[in-house]
């Protein structure tokens, strides 16, 4: 983009992107549009890396073996020995998360998850998810004021993933605390002084917890993911105890906050587009395309990080070995080169090839589960709550650079049963 300068000369516009600014956290899309148009491969001093915003670049690079998903090793190598020693368990566990590994380690860890986490196993959950959704809405108990995150969008996926792994639901509060401490380390743009220590403590406690749970499952196998992973590891896939524990922690971590934000951001999009909410109420069979549009228009995953294993050129920029790249999924999902009228929210959008679940070998293992929870959850909210309105003017967005979502979504609602009576 070139701006005229008093009719004398032209200079390229400079676009800056600081994900720490409250205005960017609340609404990053105008800056994404400027970056995509003027500087799609943008060097960010603030982030110390390249910010990529075009669909074609992001999708291609998610599947490019010249980039590594392992950002734990470079981080560890930069630490002074005493700092490294303080978070040794955290580094070991994150180093075994499939999402942070490259082949061949990734292939082995992913194969195990695929075995225990089949689409058929997920589809079998449909009645249980519908039941849980109904129970959560019953618990609104005729109230007219609810917080959709606290009362629905958080407990739904957290309960589902805990149950799926084999963690008793009574442990949910503890799991949330551990998970929040990990999230502060893994995806927060704002530095908090003690976040490394808190994440280290969370990993130590979670590992001890899952070790005991694994021992109990070995003694008495159950019909859950933990037993599936144990069986797969014992069937000769050489899954060590550390691999097993790290994978359980990853599934638990990846399996809830993202889906919470799918439901939160998705409902917010509907509330801000009453015509689209009315359309979906009138044609509930459009729930599948509506969920895909929610994932595209304001998806829960903002940035995927990669490290260049070799020098490469992208968008005319020279990327050097060891450089860090941030692939901005939410920016790519509104690229006019890929989507017609990308800024508009259309629950009936066809041929929606968003990349909110990633692309390539790291494509989200939980996508079928997230979709199922989103479809059942939002369809049931719409049918059981005939009216819903935002009860606040200013939203409190999470300051995470990786995950996008609101901390609370206060709503004023009416209930179908009350209305009928
Ligand atoms: C709407 C909800 C969700 C979204 C938007 C989402 C998004 C993503 C994305 C973008 C990736 C790719 C990461 C990368 O390329 O670096 C990913 C990977 C992953 N997701 Fe999800 N996810 C969601 C729900 C879930 C759920 C429910 C689970 C677990 C049950 C899950 C488990 C995982 C795992 C284990 C990986 C790593 C896969 C690998 O590295 O091979 N996700 N997810």
Image: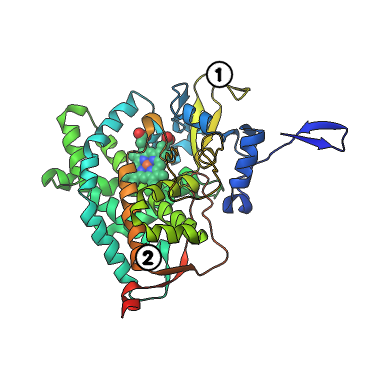
Residue in front for this viewpoint, 43 or 350:
350
Indicate whether 241 appears above or below 421: above
User: Can you tell me whether the CB of the residue at mark 1 lies under 8 Å from the nearest atom of ligand 1?
Assistant: no
Residue in front for this viewpoint, 419 or 74:
419
* Residue farthest along the bottom direction in this orientation: 421
What residue is at 49 percent from the left and 59 percent from the top? 275
**Quarter occupied by residue 1:** top right
Indicate whether 57 appears above or below 181: above
Residue at the disc numbered 2: 151
Q: How far is mark 2 from mark 1, CA to CA?
A: 48 Å
Q: Which of marks 1 and 2 precedes in the sequence?
A: 2
**Quarter occupied by residue 312:** top right
Q: Residues within 10 Å of mark 1 (few under 14, many from 20)?
A: few
Determine whether the residue tagged by mark 2 lies in a helix, strand or loop. helix
Quarter of the picture for ligand 1?
Answer: top left
292 horizontally vs 118: left or right: right
Q: Position of residue 178 (x, y in %)?
A: 38, 52
């Amino acid at each position: 983009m070139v701006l005229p300068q008093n009719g004398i000369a032209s200079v390229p516009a400079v676009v800056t992107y600081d994900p720490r600014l409250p205005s960017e956290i609340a609404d990053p899309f105008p800056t994404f549009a400027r970056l995509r148009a003027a500087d799609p491969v943008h060097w960010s001093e603030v982030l110390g890396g390249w910010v990529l915003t075009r669909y074609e670049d992001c999708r291609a690079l998610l599947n490019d073996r010249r980039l590594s998903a392992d950002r734990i090793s470079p981080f560890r190598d930069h630490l002074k020995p005493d700092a490294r020693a303080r978070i040794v368990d955290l580094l070991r566990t994150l180093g075994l998360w499939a999402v942070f590994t490259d082949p061949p380690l990734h292939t082995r860890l992913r194969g195990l998850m695929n075995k225990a986490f089949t689409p058929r196993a997920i589809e079998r959950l449909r009645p249980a998810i519908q039941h849980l959704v109904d129970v959560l809405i019953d618990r609104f108990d005729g109230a007219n004021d609810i917080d959709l995150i606290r009362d629905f969008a958080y407990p739904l996926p957290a309960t589902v993933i805990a149950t799926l792994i084999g963690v008793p639901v009574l442990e949910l509060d503890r799991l949330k605390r551990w998970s929040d401490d990990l999230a502060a380390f893994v995806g927060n743009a704002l530095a908090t002084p003690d976040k490394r220590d808190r994440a280290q403590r969370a990993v130590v406690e979670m590992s001890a917890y899952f070790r005991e749970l694994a021992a109990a499952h070995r003694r008495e196998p159950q019909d859950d993911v933990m037993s599936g992973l144990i069986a797969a590891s014992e069937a000769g896939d050489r899954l060590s105890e550390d691999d097993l524990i790290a994978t359980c922690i990853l599934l638990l971590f990846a399996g809830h906050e993202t889906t919470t934000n799918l439901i939160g951001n998705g409902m917010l999009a509907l509330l801000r587009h009453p015509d689209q909410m009315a359309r979906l109420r009138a044609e509930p069979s459009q729930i599948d395309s509506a969920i895909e549009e929610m994932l595209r228009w304001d998806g829960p995953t903002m940035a995927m990080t990669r490290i260049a294993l070799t020098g490469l050129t992208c968008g005319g920029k020279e990327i050097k070995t060891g450089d860090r790249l941030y692939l901005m999924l939410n920016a790519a999902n509104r690229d006019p080169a890929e989507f017609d009228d990308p800024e508009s929210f259309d629950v009936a959008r066809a041929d929606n090839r968003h990349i909110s679940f990633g692309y390539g070998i790291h494509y989200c293992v939980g996508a079928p589960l997230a979709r199922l929870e989103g479809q059942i959850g939002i369809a049931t909210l719409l049918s059981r709550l005939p009216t819903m309105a935002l009860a606040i003017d200013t939203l409190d967005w999470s300051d995470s650079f990786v995950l996008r979502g609101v901390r609370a979504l206060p709503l004023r609602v009416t209930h179908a049963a009350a209305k009928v009576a």
